[in-house]
Image (spheres, rainbow, N blue to C red):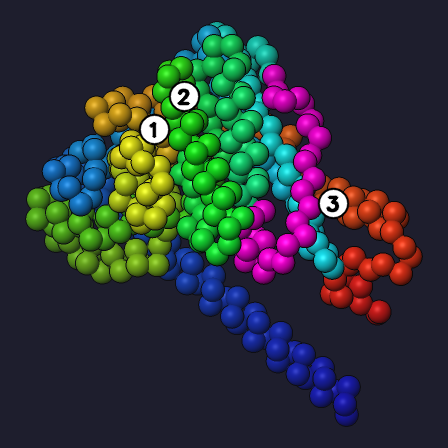
């Protein structure tokens, strides 16, 4: 009887799980269809519509919603890509952090990759950081991220010494993302180091005429979606010559943007070889930019879709206001050229290489933990209880 009851409950729970999975899949399909219909209306209307570049609150710098992107000729070009890897292991009485960063530097001639160099080398030894002070889990996560970013920024500055480097790409944003940095003196100090390192990198790239780009693989931003929802849709209805069916479709489906990220919507709006309009980063929450001083009004972003079967990538760059469109076009065409080798991966090859070289296998930090334990008394326990259950 007990066995039959357990089987009955198990089957019931399994069916409940299957039903829930089905509902999730159906919701994803329905939201995708709404985004597709919205994108269809917007693409039909875009020839009759210009973005409100005179609206100071929006801080838009281009009037078209979508721009075609060509491919930059890979001739006599040197491109650097920087990425980092990090592992951390909380232990009893201390935390261990293992971090490294690498710059892959690709040189092209006549459309072909002719050399690949690495800084500091092809497989740099990771840096071991031990933290003895008491930090809660949130503070430790922030500390780990900051240490990784500082390492990446240091390597990025050093990579600028490469001969004739034309562009430098960071994996991720070119703006510090640590908004919760005031909980302790150590984190505040590290945050100051990060902002100083970013502004130094901006300045050196400008002085050497190096195009600095941040490629955000999996952006969670909803900035463009909010612009469409709050400003663009109403302007489209006012100014575009939409058929009645298009107006109805816009009204019926625009609510999906309240639960959409930029990349989810733009995946339907953009076709391969297209980018979105450029927008100023300065409209972000003030605490993200307040420590960047005069640079805060020189940081811009757009989304580009180099290939058919991957979502658009967010690209950030630094530019003087008068050069924004020119730099956006140059950046987009370069990303397009470097990302179009695989139809399902919208990431520049130089960053893929840097990521592969910087990645740290999980066992590395366990080996270091074991090495420390071997030097201590047999009764000394470092692992947390959750790591040493008796059964």
Callout 1: SS: strand
Neighbour tally class for label 3: few under 14, some 14-19, many 20 plus, Cα within 10 Å: some
Report the number of discs: 3
Label 2 to label 3: alpha-carbon separation: 35 Å
Asked whether 332 falls inside the magenta stretch, the response is no
Work out whether residue 379 or residue 43 is closer to the camera in this orientation and state it.
379
Residue for point 51% across, 70% down: 20
In x, y percent, where is residue 262? 35, 47
In x, y percent, where is residue 7? 72, 82
Residue 365 numbered mark, or none: 3
Callout 2: SS: helix
Residue for point 76% across, 90% down: 2
Quadrant location of the N terminus in the rendered image = bottom right
Work out whether residue 322 or residue 340 is closer to the camera in this orientation and state it.
322
Label 3 to label 1: alpha-carbon separation: 36 Å
Label 2 to label 1: alpha-carbon separation: 9 Å
Tell whether label 3 touches label 2 (CB within 8 Å).
no
In x, y percent, where is residue 377? 90, 55
**Residue 58 relative to residue 102: left or right:** left
Residue 259 seen anywhere in this rendered image of the structure: yes
Residue for point 82% across, 60% down: 381
Q: Which residues are magenta?
A: 117-144
Residue 305 seen anywhere in this rendered image of the structure: no
**Residue 361 relative to residue 140: left or right:** right
**Which residue carries the number 1 mark?**
318
Seen in the picture, residue 11 relative to 277 is either above or below; the reply is below
| Residue at the bottom extreme, as displayed | 1
Asked whether 121 falls inside the magenta stretch, the response is yes
**Which residue carries the number 2 mark?**
205
Rendered image quadrant of residue 210: top left
Neighbour tally class for label 2: few under 14, some 14-19, many 20 plus, Cα within 10 Å: many
């Amino acid at each position: 009887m007990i066995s039959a009851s357990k089987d009955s409950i198990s089957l019931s729970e399994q069916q409940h799980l299957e039903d829930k999975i089905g509902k999730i899949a159906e919701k994803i399909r329905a939201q995708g269809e709404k985004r597709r219909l919205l994108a269809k209306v917007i693409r039909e209307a875009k020839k009759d519509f210009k973005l409100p570049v005179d609206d100071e609150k929006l801080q838009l710098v281009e009037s078209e919603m979508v721009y075609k992107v060509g491919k930059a000729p890979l001739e006599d070009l040197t491109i650097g890509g920087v990425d980092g890897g990090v592992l951390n292991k909380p232990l009893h009485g201390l935390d261990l952090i293992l971090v490294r960063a690498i710059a892959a530097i690709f040189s092209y001639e006549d459309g072909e990759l002719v050399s690949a160099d690495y800084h500091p080398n092809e497989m740099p030894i990771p840096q071991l950081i031990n933290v003895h002070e008491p930090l809660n889990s949130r503070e430790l996560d922030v500390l780990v991220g900051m240490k990784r970013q500082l390492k990446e920024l240091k390597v990025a500055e050093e990579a600028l010494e490469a001969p004739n480097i034309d562009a430098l790409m960071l994996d991720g944003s070119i703006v510090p993302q640590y908004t919760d940095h005031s909980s302790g003196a150590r984190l505040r100090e590290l945050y100051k180091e990060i902002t100083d390192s970013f502004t130094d990198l901006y300045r050196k790239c400008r002085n050497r005429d190096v195009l600095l780009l941040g490629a955000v693989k999996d952006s969670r931003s909803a900035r463009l979606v909010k612009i469409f929802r709050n400003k663009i849709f109403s302007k489209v209805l006012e100014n575009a010559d939409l058929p009645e069916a298009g107006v109805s479709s816009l009204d019926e489906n625009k609510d999906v943007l309240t639960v959409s990220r930029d990349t989810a919507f733009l995946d339907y709006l953009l076709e391969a070889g297209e980018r979105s309009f450029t927008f100023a980063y300065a409209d972000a929450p003030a605490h993200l930019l307040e420590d960047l001083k005069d640079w805060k009004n020189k940081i811009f972003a757009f989304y580009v879709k180099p290939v058919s079967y991957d979502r658009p990538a967010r690209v950030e760059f630094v530019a003087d206001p008068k050069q924004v469109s020119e730099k956006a076009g140059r950046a987009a065409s370069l990303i397009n050229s470097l990302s179009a080798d695989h139809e399902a991966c919208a990431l520049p090859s130089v960053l893929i290489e840097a990521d592969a070289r910087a990645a740290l296998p999980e066992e590395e930090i366990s080996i270091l933990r074991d090495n420390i334990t071997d030097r201590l008394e047999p009764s000394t326990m470092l692992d947390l209880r959750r790591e040493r259950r008796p059964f």
